[in-house]
Amino acid sequence: MHKNGFTLIELIVVVSILGILSITALPRFLDISNEALVTKLNSMKNNLESATYRVYAKALLAEKITGTQTITIDGDMITINSGYPIGNWDGTVRHILNFSLIGNSANNCPYDWCGRGNAQTLPGGLTSSNGRGVKVTPFGYNHTDLCGVNYMNHYDGTFPQIEVLTSEC
């Protein structure tokens, strides 16, 4: 008599093969997810750089490239020093990135991006003796995690330092 179906041995072989395939594919999938986050962080760095150049160009045209002053961009009052945005989330960086409705967050960022700043020392060790900085953090991460983008205006007239942190992503 001929029965339709699979034997127990055939099923065990198929499940074993699927297990082996998943073990080899899973690390590659996790690595791709990490690469996507690093790409997202680099994109944020580029956005910060572009926004900083835009603010500086507007400050240059308004002859406001010395000391601490304010300019208005898209209806938002932006505080600048040496023509560059200061490192403050609430007063500056969230506005130049068009995240005006997103407040600062220190723990478990509930939005695509969160920020926290107005500090002389940022996670990852970026410091300034005179200026101020802000850290922009992606969804789900804390301000202190080494996963995000640091922005530091040193108040010395040089272009702000903008760095990507990926060691804890």
Image (tube, rainbow, N blue to C red):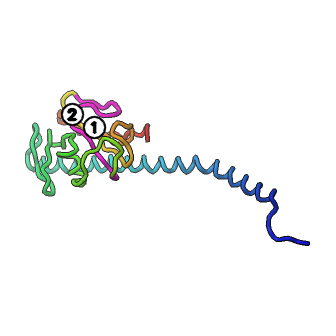
**Is the residue marked by circle 1 packed among few (<14), some (14-19), or many (20+) residues within 10 Å?**
some
Mark 1: which amino acid? Gln
Q: Report the quarter where the C terminus lies.
A: top left
In which quadrant of the rendered image does the N terminus lie? Answer: bottom right
Residue ranking furthest to the right: 1
The residue under the point 32% across, 46% down is 45
Check if mark 1's residue and mark 2's residue have beta carbons within 8 Å: yes
Residue 94 relative to residue 81: left or right? right
Q: Circle 2 sits in a helix, a strand or a loop, which is it? A: loop
Residue 82, above or below 102: above
Which residue is at 20% across, 46% downward? 90
What's the residue type where badge 2 is placed? His
Q: Position of residue 100 (x, y in %)?
A: 21, 53
Q: Based on the displayed image, in which of its 4 quarters is residue 135 positioned?
A: top left
**Left or right, residue 42 beside residue 72:** right
Region of the chain picked out in magenta, as a range: 111-128
Question: Majority secondary structure of the magenta segment?
Answer: loop
Q: CA distance from mark 1 to mark 2?
A: 8 Å
Residue 65 image position (x, y, % from top left): 12, 41
**Magenta stretch encompasses residue 62:** no
Q: Is residue 112 above or below residue 136?
A: below
Q: Residue at x 76, y 59 (%)?
A: 11
Q: Which residue is mark 2?
A: 154
Q: Earlier in the sequence, mark 1 or mark 2?
A: 2
Q: From the viewer's side, name the closer residue of 71 and 168.
A: 168
Q: Is residue 22 left or right of residue 135?
A: right
Q: Nearer the viewer, residue 116 or 59?
A: 116
Is the residue marked by circle 2 packed among few (<14), some (14-19), or many (20+) residues within 10 Å?
many
Read off the residue under disc 1: 161
Q: SS for tag 1?
A: strand
Please provide percent x and percent y for residue 38. Answer: 42, 46
Which is nearer the eye, 53 or 98?
Answer: 98
